[in-house]
Image (cartoon, coloured by chain):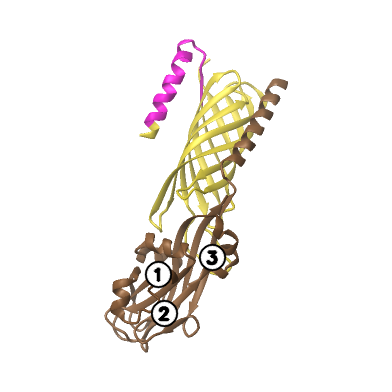
C-alpha cells in the first residue's frame, strides 16, 4: 500500500520532467555496517540495500530504496542472552544534494531522507512498523561515465510507539550504474 | 563548487536543527533482577513468591521520569523436578500498588493475578533452564505485564500446575529482564 502510494507520488512528480527529457536514471547496490546508537538491546550488525537514482535537477537526486539491516546479538554483563538482534526492513526515500550522476571524478554529497521501517524480533514474535528520517553524507567516485563507487555514512532516527526513537548509524560502500545517454 | 558547499552547509545546519527538534535524545536500556530461592524467592506453602523492586536500579532511577516505552519483559528460570513424571509450572504477576499484596491461596493467585508464563515444562528427574530467548515462547499477558513493570515493581507467584510440592519440584531461581526506552 505504502510502496504503491510512493510510486504514484513519484510518477506525478516525475511526469513533467520526463516529458521534457530532463530525468536521468540509475540504480545502485550497497552494503556495510550498522551501528545501534544508545540501544543496549542491539549490537553492531550489517546492512544491505538497493536503490534507484532519479536525477531531477543538476544537483538533486531522488533515491527510493530498500535496505535490510540485521543487528548483532546483544550481550550483557549480568546475564546470558540468547536473544537475536533485530531485523529492520527500511523503505526509504532520500534526497541527495550534490554528488555526481555518472562521469569520472570525486564528488561529495549530503542526503536527507524519510522512511518506513519494519523492525522485527523473531523470537519474541513482534514486528513494529514506524516512520523515521535519516541524514548523512558521502562521496561518489566516478570510475567510468556510467559507473560510480559510492561511500556514505548516515544516521537514521526511527520513531517508536511510545514517543521515543531508535537511532543507528551506518557506513556503506556500493556501486551505482547509470542508464541512458 | 562553492555554491554546492554552501548548500551542503545549509543542509547540515537544517539537519542538526531537525535532529534536536524531533526528540531524538533518547535511548534504550536493559536491566535485570535475579530472584534466588531462600533469598528473594520464597516458598509460601502454596507457591513460590518473590518481589522485584526496580526503583533502586540506577538506570531506572535515572530515566524513569522520561520513560517512553517498556519494550520487552523476559525471564530466565531455573527449576528442578526430582519426580519421575514431567511437571509444568506457571508464573503469575501483580504489582505493589495493585492492592493484591496478600494473596495466600493458589486460587486467589489464579483468579486475581495475571498469568505471565504459561505451562513451562519441567522434564522428570532433571534440572531445567529456560533461557531469556525461550521465555518469550511461554509469555502471556504481555500488555498487563508491561504496565506492572512501568509501575516500578513486580510481585511474582510461581506454582506447579495441579500440585503444590516444593520438595521435589521447585523453582531454583528466576531473573526478570526489562528493556525500556526513555528520552526527552
- State if disc 3 and disc 1 touch (CB < 8 Å): no
Where is B158 relative to B72, above or below?
Answer: below
Where is residue A169? Give x, y as percent.
Answer: 59, 44
Q: Would you say A18 lies left or right of A156 here?
A: left
The residue sitting at 42% across, 48% down in the picture is A128
Task: Say which chain tag 1 marks.
Answer: B
Which residue in the rendered view is the most extreme toward the right?
B2
- Which residue position is annotated with label 1? B98
Which dot marks residue B31? 3
Q: Which of the marked residues, 2 or 1, is nearer the chain's N terminus?
A: 2
Q: CA distance from mark 3 to mark 2?
A: 21 Å
The quadrant in which the N terminus of chain A is found is: top left
The reply to whether residue A30 is in sight is yes
Q: Which of the marked residues, 1 or 3, is nearer the chain's N terminus?
A: 3
Q: Would you say B117 lies left or right of A143 here?
A: left
Chain letter tied to yellow: A
Instruction: Give the SS element for disc 1.
Output: helix
Chain letter tied to brown: B
Task: Say which chain tag 3 marks.
Answer: B
The residue sitting at 48% across, 10% down in the picture is A20
Residue B113 falls in image quadrant = bottom left
Q: Which region shows up in magenta?
A: A4-26
Q: CA distance from mark 1 to mark 3?
A: 23 Å
Where is residue B31? Give x, y as percent.
Answer: 54, 65
Q: Residues within 10 Å of mark 3 (few under 14, many from 20)?
A: some
Instruction: Give the SS element for disc 2.
Output: strand
- Which residue position is annotated with label 2? B49
Q: CA distance from mark 2 to mark 1?
A: 16 Å
Marks 2, 1 in one chain = yes
Q: Nearer the viewer, residue B147 or A19?
A: B147
Amino acid at each position: 500500500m505504502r510502496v504503491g502510494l510512493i510510486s504514484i507520488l513519484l510518477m506525478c512528480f516525475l511526469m513533467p520532467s520526463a516529458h521534457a527529457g530532463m530525468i536521468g536514471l540509475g540504480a545502485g547496490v550497497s552494503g556495510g555496517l550498522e551501528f545501534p546508537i544508545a540501544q543496549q538491546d542491539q549490537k553492531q550488525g550489517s546492512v544491505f540495500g538497493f536503490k534507484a537514482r532519479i536525477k531531477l535537477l543538476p544537483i538533486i537526486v531522488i533515491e527510493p530504496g530498500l535496505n535490510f539491516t540485521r543487528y548483532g546479538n546483544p550481550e550483557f554483563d549480568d546475564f546470558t542472552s540468547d536473544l537475536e538482534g533485530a531485523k529492520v526492513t527500511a523503505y526509504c526515500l532520500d534526497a541527495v544534494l550534490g554528488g555526481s550522476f555518472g562521469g569520472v571524478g570525486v564528488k561529495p554529497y549530503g542526503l536527507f531522507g524519510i522512511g518506513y521501517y519494519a523492525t522485527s524480533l523473531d523470537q519474541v514474535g513482534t514486528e513494529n512498523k514506524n516512520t523515521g528520517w535519516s541524514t548523512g553524507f558521502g562521496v561518489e567516485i566516478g570510475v567510468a561515465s556510467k559507473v560510480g563507487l559510492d561511500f556514505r555514512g548516515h544516521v537514521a532516527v526511527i520513531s517508536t510507539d511510545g514517543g521515543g526513537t531508535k537511532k543507528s548509524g551506518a557506513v556503506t560502500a556500493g556501486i551505482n550504474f547509470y542508464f541512458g545517454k | 563548487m562553492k555554491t554546492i558547499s554552501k548548500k551542503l552547509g545549509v543542509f547540515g545546519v537544517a539537519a542538526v536543527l531537525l535532529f534536536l527538534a524531533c526528540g531524538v535524545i533518547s535511548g534504550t536500556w536493559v536491566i535485570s533482577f535475579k530472584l534466588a530461592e531462600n533469598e528473594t524467592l520464597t516458598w509460601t506453602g502454596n507457591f513460590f513468591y518473590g518481589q522485584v523492586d526496580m526503583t533502586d536500579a540506577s538506570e531506572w532511577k535515572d530515566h524513569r521520569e522520561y520513560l517512553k516505552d517498556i519494550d520487552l519483559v523476559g525471564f530466565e528460570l531455573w527449576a528442578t523436578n526430582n519426580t519421575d513424571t514431567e511437571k509444568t509450572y506457571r508464573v503469575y504477576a501483580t504489582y505493589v500498588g495493585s492492592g493484591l499484596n496478600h494473596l495466600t491461596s493458589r486460587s486467589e493467585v489464579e483468579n486475581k493475578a495475571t498469568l505471565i508464563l504459561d505451562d513451562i515444562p519441567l522434564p522428570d528427574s532433571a534440572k531445567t533452564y529456560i533461557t531469556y530467548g525461550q521465555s518469550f515462547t511461554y509469555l502471556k499477558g504481555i500488555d498487563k505485564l508491561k504496565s506492572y513493570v512501568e509501575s516500578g515493581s513486580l510481585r511474582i507467584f510461581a506454582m506447579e500446575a495441579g500440585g503444590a510440592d516444593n520438595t521435589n519440584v521447585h523453582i531454583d531461581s528466576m531473573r526478570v529482564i526489562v528493556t525500556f526506552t526513555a528520552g526527552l
